[in-house]
């Protein structure tokens, strides 16, 4: 077989299979095998909302340099189910090499006796491991590394199963023995790097930011973050709520009692929480709200990606009060912004949002440990005294925040309009002062808002604009184009916007990329920064932008 | 401890003169003072309604949140600081209507709190509509042909769900209500006290006199017998008062949290441990 990609320094591999077939296990084994062999890797997946059957796929990019974006081109397609080829037909190109079971693929493809060999080991369940072994040998992953990954994955299932998996892996390696191998240059420094996904990056950042409590209701694509934090049971209390309404109210209770708290959800789940977003605003109790966006409205496409809920987050909850919204693009930013979200929430006593999406939540890649930067811990709680007043009026709108049991004052919070002591009031003069108090926090929030990041020259002619998870495809496309007249501007704080935002955009030919139909950030930029974005490239079919798509669209503009 | 320690003389009480809520407020103050629970160790959690205003009239920490949601923040408060005494004060609309789902699941969680529900069988604050506990044929401006639904029976629901303490009191009898609330406060785990409370403005049917004539105290009742408790709680005319059911042996929500197994400190006292986070990060260098 001629592997046309064998001398490239970067190969895109796609695994296609059915839900319940163990494709996720293979993805993990391959990803870790590549990484531990010294390759830069990134993986992103698309899957159907089904427990069994349906077609899913994972893309793994293997490279000599850091990679992190989704591409549409496929160098090697490993079909683990008969339906995979049909499902992935748009991502098969003339130079794509297809590998699959000899019974499932035609003569142009590389048909291999996966199933037959699997039967020899103990049944069709081993097909995937045989395929993974063949792929790892093709990519010159040392057998010892591959076996270490198998052990890590299967040792908990008992020695007998592990041995069968190792045998299956060996059979896979045998298959590829005589093939011309892929010659991607290995980077030994990758071996000591970390391999993370977007959900873990937010989870780790939340822990570093002080998260002690999370209540949530399972909902794709926020569930992996919930699982990650539930596992940290000696550091964080996780409580699965009966519904999202309870979840945010519970987190606000824990926060009131002094535990930095969060919730994790997605669009429709967050819709149920919006009542309590207003409560957070009114009682000035901090909370971090993670929204893993997926296409709506209503149930939409549960397992796909979107950026449709910026408006929902921005305008959620009755009444007027300050809030902040972050949307990380890179995993290292997800780590840092999650800490920042907790710090800001505690400092300003407000709800702070982290907008992620299915693509980012499931996106894996390797990065140096030092890229995950810890922010200095800060303390915002005060010890209360006898005449403590929770809503004492102050010049910046922030009242010293006490918690029950810390000091001898009483902490009174009320969803009704309240006086400085926290008790119900209908004093309309005081009402106005309280509204101003809650809203004026926005002035200082603006002063510490993160500016967008500009890649390229300040005086570039054309500016690609993106936010959140579109970072990687846009950045890679911008880098590939390598034009002095082209810049890329990425927003990771969407609200409030940095006061100089207009300066970055004014006088430029601007093209914004968003995974929604409205151009929600474009609209916000017009409203808040007074800048009209000239062209919108909008994608809302549930898939992320690919690098190639961005490249094509830029060519049309320039 | 004198009950006056809970007084808030400056409070502007919004209840109608003669409201059943006054009896409950008094009984709660007496029960708290009997048990020497200090205001700074007490958190009163409530939602919206006339009952939900009680925390503004009694000295303690207060979380007066959203309509129907009070049990959720109460759960969060106990999760973050199990040493606090948490009393959730709600009305029948707040707890059994808007908050029905939270009511069910807080019982299942067995959070160590006392749930007082002022049950006047009518919506007071919104001026006289039916509540989940309104009796059949009760006419209101919205239920123009009278209520036709089966009244919600919180006691049988709570017993069915395995609540560890289920009682009913009557606001017109402060002394007995004080004793029942005291037992509820002493109970480890979730404790429900449904309290019949006349609304003198919007419920002209279920008045002080009506409750007096239609209630009696349980006698010779074994509160550890769940089936019997269920039967007694199903009685609707007259209505028994007292402790229907108690199971002292149930593990609470907080006792199930592993975060407190080796460290009893409330969560606000715990610093971030950067080493723990770094360890988790470094664990992602190998599969």
Image (cartoon, coloured by chain):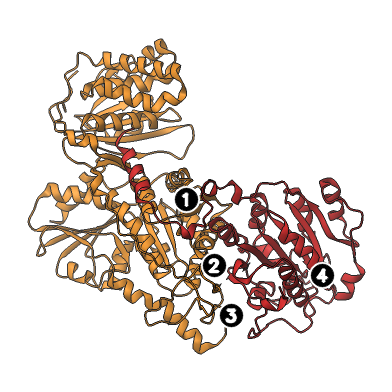
Q: Chain of mark 4?
A: B
- In the image, residue A36 sits, relative to residue B25, either above or below, namely above
Disc 1 crowd rating (10 Å Cα; few below 14, some 14-19, many 20+) is many
- Which residue is label 2 attached to? A404
Looking at the rendered image, the disc whose residue lies closer to the viewer, 2 or 3, is 2
Viewed as shown, does residue A253 lie left or right of B30? Answer: left
* Cα–Cα span, label 1 and label 2: 20 Å
Q: Secondary structure at mark 2?
A: loop
Which disc is residue A236 wearing?
1
Labels 2 & 3 near each other (Cβ < 8 A) = no
Q: Which chain is red?
A: B
Q: Is residue A414 visible?
A: no
Q: Residue at x 38, y 25 (%)?
A: A81
* Cα–Cα span, label 2 and label 3: 19 Å
What is the drawing colour of chain A?
Answer: orange
* Both marks 4 and 2 on one chain: no
* Both marks 4 and 1 on one chain: no
Q: Earlier in the sequence, mark 1 or mark 2?
A: 1
* Cα–Cα span, label 4 and label 3: 32 Å
């Amino acid at each position: 077989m001629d592997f046309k990609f064998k001398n490239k320094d970067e190969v895109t591999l796609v695994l296609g299979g059915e839900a319940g077939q163990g494709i996720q296990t293979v993805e993990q084994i391959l990803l870790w095998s590549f990484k531990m062999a010294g390759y830069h890797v990134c993986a992103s997946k698309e899957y159907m909302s089904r427990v069994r059957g349906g077609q899913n796929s994972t893309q793994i990019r293997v490279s000599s340099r850091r990679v992190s974006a989704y591409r549409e081109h496929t160098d090697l397609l490993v079909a683990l189910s008969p339906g995979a080829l049909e499902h992935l037909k748009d991502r098969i190109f003339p130079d794509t090499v297809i590998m699959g079971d000899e019974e499932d693929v035609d003569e142009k493809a590389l048909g291999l006796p996966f199933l037959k060999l699997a039967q020899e080991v103990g049944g069709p369940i081993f097909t995937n491991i045989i395929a993974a072994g063949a792929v790892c040998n093709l990519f010159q992953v040392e057998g010892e590394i591959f076996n270490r990954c198998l052990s890590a994955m299967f040792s908990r299932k008992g020695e007998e199963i592990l041995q069968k998996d190792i045998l299956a892996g060996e059979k896979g390696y045998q298959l590829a023995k005589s093939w011309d191998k892929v010659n991607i240059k290995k980077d030994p420094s990758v071996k000591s790097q970390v391999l993370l996904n977007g959900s873990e990056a937010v989870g780790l950042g939340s822990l570093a930011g002080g998260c002690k409590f999370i209540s949530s209701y399972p909902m794709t694509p926020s569930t992996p973050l919930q699982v990650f934090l539930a596992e940290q049971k000696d550091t964080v209390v996780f409580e699965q709520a009966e519904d999202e309404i309870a979840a945010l109210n519970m987190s606000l209770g824990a926060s009131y009692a002094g535990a930095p708290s969060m919730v994790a959800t997605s669009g429709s789940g967050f819709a149920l929480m919006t009542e309590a977003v207003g409560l957070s605003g009114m009682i000035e109790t901090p909370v971090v709200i993670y929204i893993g966006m997926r296409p709506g409205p209503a149930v939409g496409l549960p397992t796909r990606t979107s950026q449709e809920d910026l408006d929902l987050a921005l305008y959620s909850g009755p009444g007027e009060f300050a809030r902040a919204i972050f949307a990380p693009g890179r995993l290292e930013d997800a780590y840092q912004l999650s800490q920042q979200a907790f710090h800001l929430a505690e400092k300003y006593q407000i709800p702070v949002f982290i907008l992620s999406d299915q693509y980012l939540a499931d996106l894996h890649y390797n990065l140096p440990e030092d890229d995950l930067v810890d922010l200095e811990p800060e303390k915002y709680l005060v010890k209360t005294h006898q005449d403590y007043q929770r809503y004492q009026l102050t010049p910046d709108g922030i009242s010293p925040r006490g918690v029950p049991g810390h000091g001898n004052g009483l902490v009174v919070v009320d969803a009704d309009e309240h006086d400085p002591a926290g008790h119900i009031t209908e004093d309309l003069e005081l009402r106005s002062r309280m509204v101003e108090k809650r809203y004026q926090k926005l002035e200082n929030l603006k002063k510490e808002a993160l500016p967008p990041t500009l890649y390229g020259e300040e005086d570039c002619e054309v500016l690609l604009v993106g936010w959140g998870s579109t970072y990687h495809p846009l950045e890679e496309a911008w880098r590939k184009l390598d034009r002095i007249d082209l810049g890329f501007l990425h927003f990771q704080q969407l609200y409030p916007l940095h006061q100089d935002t207009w300066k970055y955009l004014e006088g430029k030919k601007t093209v914004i990329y968003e995974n929604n139909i409205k151009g929600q950030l474009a609209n916000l930029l017009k409203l808040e920064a007074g800048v009209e974005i000239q062209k919108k490239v909008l994608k809302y079919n549930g898939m992320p932008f690919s690098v190639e798509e961005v490249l094509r669209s830029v060519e049309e503009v320039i | 401890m004198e009950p006056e320690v809970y007084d808030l003389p400056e409070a502007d009480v919004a209840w109608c003169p003669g409201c059943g809520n006054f009896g409950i407020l008094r009984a709660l103050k007496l029960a708290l003072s009997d048990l020497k629970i200090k205001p700074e160790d007490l958190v009163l959690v409530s939602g919206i309604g006339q009952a939900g205003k009680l925390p503004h009239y009694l000295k303690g920490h207060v979380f007066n949140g959203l309509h129907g949601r009070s049990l959720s923040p109460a759960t969060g408060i106990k999760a973050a600081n199990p040493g606090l005494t948490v009393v959730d004060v709600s009305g029948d609309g707040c707890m059994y209507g808007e908050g029905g789902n939270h009511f069910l699941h807080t019982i299942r969680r067995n959070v160590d709190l006392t749930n007082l529900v002022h049950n006047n069988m009518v919506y007071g604050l919104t001026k006289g509509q039916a509540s989940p506990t309104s009796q059949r044929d009760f006419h209101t401006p919205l239920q123009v042909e009278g209520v036709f639904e089966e009244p919600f029976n919180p006691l049988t629901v709570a017993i069915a769900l395995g609540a560890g303490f289920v009682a009913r009191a009557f606001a017109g009898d402060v002394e007995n209500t004080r004793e029942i609330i005291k037992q509820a406060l002493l109970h480890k785990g979730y404790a429900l006290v449904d309290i019949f409370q006349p609304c003198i403005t919007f419920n002209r049917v279920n008045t002080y006199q009506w409750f007096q004539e239609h209630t009696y105290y349980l006698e010779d009742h074994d509160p550890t017998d769940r089936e019997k408790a269920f039967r007694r709680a199903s009685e609707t005319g007259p209505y028994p008062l007292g402790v229907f059911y108690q199971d002292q042996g149930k593990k609470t929500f907080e006792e199930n949290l592993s975060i407190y197994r080796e460290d009893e400190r409330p969560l606000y006292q715990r610093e971030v441990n950067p080493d723990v986070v770094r360890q988790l990060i470094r664990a992602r260098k190998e599969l």
